[in-house]
Image: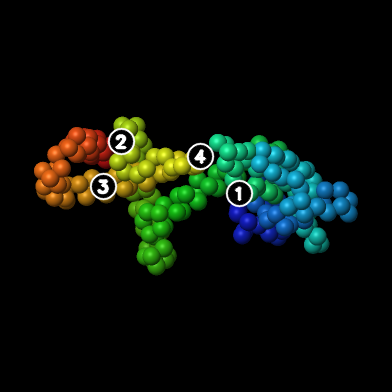
Amino acid sequence: MLGDREFCSLKLANWLTEQKVYFCLRIKKDAFIEIEPKIWLQLKDSGLSPGVSFFYQGIKYTKATGFISFNLAGKWKRKRFGVAPEEGWFILTNLDNLDSAIIAYKQRFDIEEMFRDFKSGGYNLEDTNVSGRRLISLILLISLAYTAATISGQKIKHKGVQKYVGRIKESLRTVRRHSSFYIGLYGSNWVNFMENSYELVAELMILAPNKRKYYQQGERAMRLILSAS
């Protein structure tokens, strides 16, 4: 079970432990943990900084009554190219080591990306306002379309023409700008736009013949994207 700060609660952690379910729940930096008997530490004062990580075993989380002992993983990614994440992670868990907790929690971001693609980043699922069986049916259809777009995006990247769909690099950005899903979905849109505006583009090439080389490169990219669909 993976949860962001909005979902972390003592009751949930206790219940998951009772159900023998492994969990990683991110907690806020203003939370308190008891690292030794009657010695409480607020997480923002734990010394976590870029490049630092730690793992506490058998800590007590919050000063409320009725809690049991948990483990706490702390990690803040080091700087890359002079840039570091704005904040680190404090993860309440019942896993028994730092690496296991971090590897598990990282999977949450892949899930969040998928939710974004299902909603505002792609298919606007939230705007349908459907529920029940209709919602389940729609999610199944979106899942199929999502898979097809992702595979298409991977093929487009393999052919080396993703730059025609979206910018690949951005100043001071250390991670990829667009996912394979984005490239696959909007690659299809770009090709459709080219087909619908073919005559207009041909007229523009007459006015600017020095751009013909780039237009021909775009045509080649369009054919490669079509072959990846």
Q: CA distance from mark 2 to mark 1?
A: 33 Å
Label whose residue precedes the other's in the sequence (3 or 1)? 1
Within 10 angstroms of label 2, few (less than 14), some, or many (20 or more) residues? Answer: many
- Color encoding of the figure: rainbow
Within 10 angstroms of label 3, few (less than 14), some, or many (20 or more) residues? Answer: some
Q: Amino acid at mark 4?
A: Thr
Instruction: Specify whether 180 is left or right of 2.
Output: left
Label whose residue precedes the other's in the sequence (4 or 3)? 4
Which residue was labeled with disc 4? Answer: 174
Which residue was labeled with disc 1? Answer: 86
Is label 4 in contact with label 3 (beta carbons under 8 Å)?
no
Can residue 155 be seen by looking at this rendering?
Answer: no
Q: Residue at x 41, y 44 (%)?
A: 178
Q: CA distance from mark 2 to mark 3?
A: 12 Å
Nearest to viewer (mark 2 / mark 4): 4
Q: Amino acid at mark 3?
A: Trp
Which residue was labeled with disc 2? Answer: 161
Instruction: Specify whether 92 is left or right of 177.
Output: right
Label whose residue precedes the other's in the sequence (2 or 3)? 2
Nearest to viewer (mark 2 / mark 1): 1
